[in-house]
Image: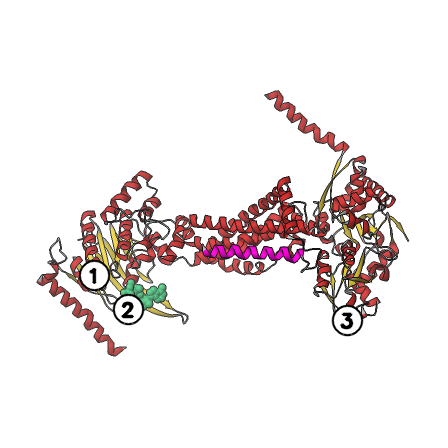
Amino acid sequence: MLTRALAILLLCVCLPAGALAQTTKLRVSTNQNIDAAAFEAAKANGYFAEEGLEIDTTPVVGGAVGLPAVAAGQVQIAASNLITIVLGVKNGLPFKIIAAGDASSSAPPDLAGVAAKPESGIKSGKELEGKRLAVNTRNNIIWMFARAWVEATGGDLRKVSFIEVPFPQMVDAIRQGRADAAFIVEPFLSVGLKSKEIEVIGWPYATVLKNAPISQWVASKTYIDQNPQVIDKFVRAYNRGTDWINENNRNEKWVSLISGYTRIAPDIVRTAATPLFVKSMDVGQIEKSIELMRKHGLLQAGDRIDVPGLLYRTVASQK
Amino acid sequence: MKKRTAGIVLLILLLLLWEASARFGWVKSENWPTLVAVLEVTYRQLLSGELSLVLAASMARMIVGFVIGSLCGILLGLLLGTLRTLDGFLTPLVEAVRPIPVPAIIPPLILFLGIDDALKIFVVAFSVFFPMLVSTVGGVRNVDETLIRTARTLQTTQGSILRFVILPAALPSIMSGFRISLPLALITTVVAEMIAGSSGIGYVIVRAQYAMQPQEMYSAVLCLMVIGYLLNLLFLLFERRLIPWYHLSENA
Amino acid sequence: MRAFLRVDQISKSYIDGAGGAEAKILNSASLEIRESEFLAVIGPSGCGKSTFLQIIAGLMPPTSGRVLLCDKPISGPPAHMVYLFQQYNKSLFPWRTVRDNVAFPMQMRGAAAADIEQACRDYIRMVGLAGHENRYPWQLSGGMQQRVAIARALAAEPRILLLDEPLSAVDALTRMELQSLILEIWERQKLTILLVTHDVDEAVFMADRVATLTVSPARIDSIIETGIPRPRDPITTRERPDFLTFRRDLLNTLLNRQHAQIPST
Ligand SMILES: Nc1ncnc2c1ncn2[C@@H]1O[C@H](COP(=O)(O)OP(=O)(O)OP(=O)(O)O)[C@@H](O)[C@H]1O
Ligand SMILES: [Mg+2]
């Protein structure tokens, strides 16, 4: 009895120490949408495991949940979007981007577009004056680019009302007349287009900022400082996932991977437009995004954002 | 009995209307599945055991949050109801916090509680706390002074008066608080599960929405309705056991 | 005889409504109650009888003056003194059955379950409610409810019983039955009873002495000792010439005083 208890005690003392030397547990929060494809590929292909990382994924909705969880230390790494990350940094939450995620393309079809009923006659921001444009949430990346697009296509922002509709309900909102147009992301956009009841009237990312940075991976400064080699391992594995996604673009393995973790039917995955999965970030594009944030009131004149300081050394950057 | 049959007939008619509206395309939307498809999914998930796992996760959170929230509400309610001095400076605070909608407090709460069960349980407890507090205070304030004086003249200590007179006398009001907060707890659990995590009805609903699997979403909604109905039934049974005198004396 | 219970110049004022003006209800009322006696206090409706009795019961502090029990001033309800409320329907616990209502004071004392069981049966039988143990108060008639209240008061093992118009809300026949029941219990348990009532007939029939409260602010006006022999019979006692005399005299004082009040108000 006693020897057995001693053995168990010994096991308890030795096991964690031994295990720690080999694998590190990382909790990562993601949106489980297409933006997480490279991450899921790295996970499914065992790239993280090869680096000695054990990944525990927590799905969240929207970029605004993962970041506070990182700040609270409950999650080590989270996916979010540039706008939300910059807002968090402005509010004093110490984040750094450790890996580039994805970016919009430079020409349509893009990962998101503004759609309206063909018979509505709405073709640009100008015709949206006095009408309702649906975005998923105010004061986020979608809202900002929708505004920039309205302005760029001749609309007066004071005359366009922005309403909040979750992505999955946007097509129905247009159909039922609850919104006159909506800035819809994939795959909801391509599925909606199939019904021929809506059509794309604009591609805000391509119009406003080609190759706009969309989603990125962040960790807290404290965690990075204490575990630089864990971050290195994560990013190394993650970048291999990015390569895999790019090399296998739309082949059957690629479709079944994405359909597997998103649970979206393979047929829909196959036809939906995807973002560009990237390993580096363009500082100029980040600065342009921040400029847009200032213009649309997400940042005040006095808010100073240190762009190079935003990027940890694991993110390759170009000027 | 007649009322119940009428209710069931109405329910069946509504379900038939649902089926027809989806089958014949009266409602045109990728998000509007036929009832048959929904039931099919429900049946499949019931067999695979996935459904019971999902429901168990939600129910566990709901029950823990509900118990914590209502216990705190009742205890503080008894205190506020009986101690006038405490009432003076706590009531303004309570009144200030009460109207805060749950979704509004979630982002800052994540900083303290994270995104796991602590957050979800707290949010459920928070939503249950106020209706319980208000109904308990109301119940305590409405206890007839004669009952308390009777207990005093029968040599009852302050503590015993609270336990044996005020609490049972306030019980009908506390039970009406339960009745309000039970569905509230269920809804809040689902809302909290929609924010983060990978278990529970709320998560299934969001995931199904974003995966464009509406039949899965409505299957979860259907389960939610059944649970809500069963909870209410359970509550009525419980109430009848706990305060039989109340309903009977109302009729007397 | 030494004063067993002494009411020493008590006055009581209520803050009246929103205005905050003080209404004086009792004005230096004094009274001495002897051990084992049956003392009735009569006064017109609203003159402050309940206030007077609740102060004696320690349920309400007087504005000035004090109440002494065996020469000790009381603060709070003293042991062995039970106040029986005028509104019996509001003073029975509606969530407790007859048995559980009667058991209440014994439970509060921490009596053993077996003793409680036995005592409940005895007290319930004493007030004539055997067979109704498991019914709820609201399932009983007014007279039966007051019997439950009496049984519950007895279960507290009082030496002094303060009765606040206990029979004013029951019908005439029931009232007579209960009067006899209370007298029987008083004699059997060797209680001291202070009965407050506006019913002169009841006061003379039940009490050894009858005190009169004047109208507001009330004070004890006169005390008479009847000396009507016991045991008293609901019919024959009421036919006695001395009973009728006391009754007439008391009614005269009460009514005259009220007549005298009219011009001044
Ligand atoms: N808590 C209170 N606050 C203010 N005034 C009160 C209060 N309680 C009683 N009073 C007033 O004091 C007076 C005497 O009341 P009390 O109940 O003692 O009279 P009573 O003689 O018992 O009347 P009744 O015969 O109707 O029972 C009444 O005028 C009443 O309105
Ligand atoms: Mg009275």
Query: Between tags 1 and 3, which lies in front?
Result: 3
Q: Quadrant of residue B103?
A: bottom right
Residue C174 x %, y %: 21, 57
* Magenta segment, prevailing SS (helix, strand or loop): helix
Q: Secondary structure at mark 2?
A: loop
What coloring was used for the rendering? secondary structure
Ligand 1, image quadrant it occupies:
bottom left
Sequence-wise first label, 2 or 1: 1
What residue would you read off at disc 1?
A: C172
Furthest residue in direction right, as rendered: A319
Q: Nearer the viewer, mark 2 or mark 3?
A: 3
Amino acid at dot 1: Ala
SS label for mark 3: loop
- Viewport quadrant of the N terminus of chain B: bottom left
For mark 2, what is the residue?
Answer: C217
Q: Residues within 10 Å of mark 2 (few under 14, many from 20)?
A: some
The residue to which callout 3 is attached is A129
Circle 2: residue type: Pro
Circle on res. B119: none
* Chain of residue at mark 1: C
Q: Residue at x 86, y 59 (%)?
A: A206
Residue pictured at 16% horizontal, 61% vertical: C204
- The answer to whether mark 1 and mark 3 are in CB contact below 8 A is no
Give the letter of the chain under mark 3. Answer: A
Q: Is residue B215 visible?
A: yes
Q: Which residues are magenta?
A: B2-23
Q: Both on one chain, marks 2 and 3?
A: no
Quadrant (top left, top right, bottom left, bottom right) of the C terminus of chain B: bottom left
